[in-house]
Image: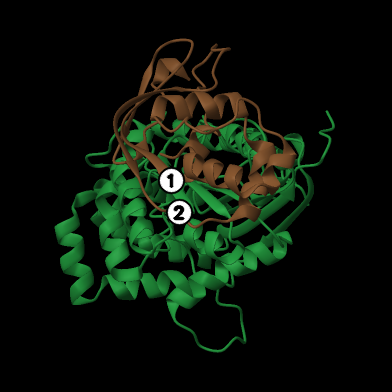
Amino acid sequence: MKLLTHNMLACHIKGVKNNFPFMIEVTKVETCDADYDPEFLRHMFPRIVWPAFLQGAEQMGCRDGLPEAATEEMLQEDTFLKKFHHALLEVRLQEGALVCPETGRKFPVSKGIPNLLLTEDEC
Amino acid sequence: MISRSSTKSCCAARLQKKTLLARGRIHTYATLLDALVRPFTSFNKISDLKAGIASFYDESSPLWEDMWGEHMHHGYYPKGSAPKSNQQAQLDMIEESLSVAGVTEVTNMLDVGCGIGGSSRYIAKKYGCRASGITLSPKQADRANEITNKAGLADRATFQVADALNQPFQDSTFDLVWSMESGEHMPDKRKFVNELARVCTPGGNVIVVTWCHRVLQQAESSLRPEELSLLDRICEAYYLPAWCSVADYEKLFTEAGLVDVVTRDWSEEVAPFWGAVIQSAMTGQGISGLLKAGWTTIKGALVMPLMAQGYNMGLIKFNLITARKPYKIST
């Protein structure tokens, strides 16, 4: 699971208000290469919730070099884009869990695939 | 002619069925095959729908992939077109759906009921977008990942085990929300459509391609008993909880706040498909594959002629429903 995906996910257990972002419990993280596509990064940037992204990056161990706040202007700087690209797309949680920030309920991540199915009582 | 609401027709249908059972009457069968297949499809059924769906695909996915490849949906065979392979017909189905919806660019798509990721990869390659796929089947998600990695598309498409009726995504996340032949499995069509609309970005497209039953006539409150019986067999084998018509879907789309709703009836265009599937099942590879796969898959195969029958009777329709999420939702 990449941080791009993490930024899209929220916990939909019935009644939960504080449902984003998931906390990340890391057992195994891997780094891989992803095609560097500045246009895609610029397109996705407005949809990324930056504080959630930073929190996720902290938990996945790739927070270094990312600014506290990011602006549209930074999207023209190659150094920023490369760091953004790396943390967003190249660091992957292979084993671990996504943890609901309100209930603490753990959703397992196995072979990079999160299992986000709710139980009958949680729907 | 708009049919009466889906809730009414589905409820009336279930009531009629229950009445038949309660009075101890013999079911009305659409065909002799329908009667013969009943004990098989009812035997060893998993009562929990989600577990049943996951189990069905966990078991049958590898065989389908062996025989048909990565796309787990009908092929598109319009009359008068040149002969083509079934795989090409499946790609044409994707292309035609995108064309009717008027999709010209995509940044971030969602594949609801993604199978082993065929649509996700195809659309990611076509538009250079990112794709997320959800499925109830952990084995399918695994396999989707594997194929995607091998295809060098791991940075474009990712897969999650999740429920289409309780999607784990934030509102307004995807500019294309895609459901290719997964709507059949949704027990609550309204919730299904509402979730599709919720996660779609304003200005984005929702595309649903699914099996429906025929639109009811004005005077009808439900399908005929023999039609219900045939659908019942199919539902049991494929873990399909409910059928509605394209008119019902159109209503749900509108009620979910989606606009510019467009539908298509492609029942004729997919007509050759079940014949082709049955043919492939009858081959040596098909039969040995079925025997190896297991009972659930065999049940699915037994019911294939009923699908063909359903189409021939004008009962089963193959429909596209597509719409846009407006920039401002009207309540």
Report the front residue among A106 and B149: B149
The numbered mark at residue A90 is 1
Q: Are marks 2 and 1 on the same chain?
A: yes
- Chain A palette colour: brown
Q: Amino acid at mark 1?
A: Glu
| Mark closer to the chain start, 2 or 1 | 2
Taking the spot 33% from the left edge, 62% from the top edge, the residue there is B150
Residue B199 left/right relative to B327: left
Q: Say what amino acid the circle numbered 2 marks.
A: Ala
Label 1: chain letter:
A
- Which of B140/A60 is in front? A60
Q: Residue at x 31, y 48 (%)?
A: B142
Tell me if residue B176 can be seen.
no
Q: Is B37 situated above or below A85?
A: below
The residue at which mark 2 appears reads as A34
**Mark 2 surroundings within 10 Å by alpha-carbon count, few (fewer than 14), some (14 through 19), many (20 or more):** some
Residue B320 seen in render: yes
Chain letter of disc 2?
A: A
Residue B272 location (% of width, % of height): 48, 75
Compared across the picture, whether B158 is left or right of B102 comes to left
**Which chain is green in the picture?**
B
Q: Where residue A115 appears, x then y in whole percent?
A: 37, 33
Dot 2 falls on a residue whose secondary structure is loop
Label 2 with label 1: CB-CB less than 8 Å: yes
Classify mark 1: helix, strand or loop.
Answer: helix
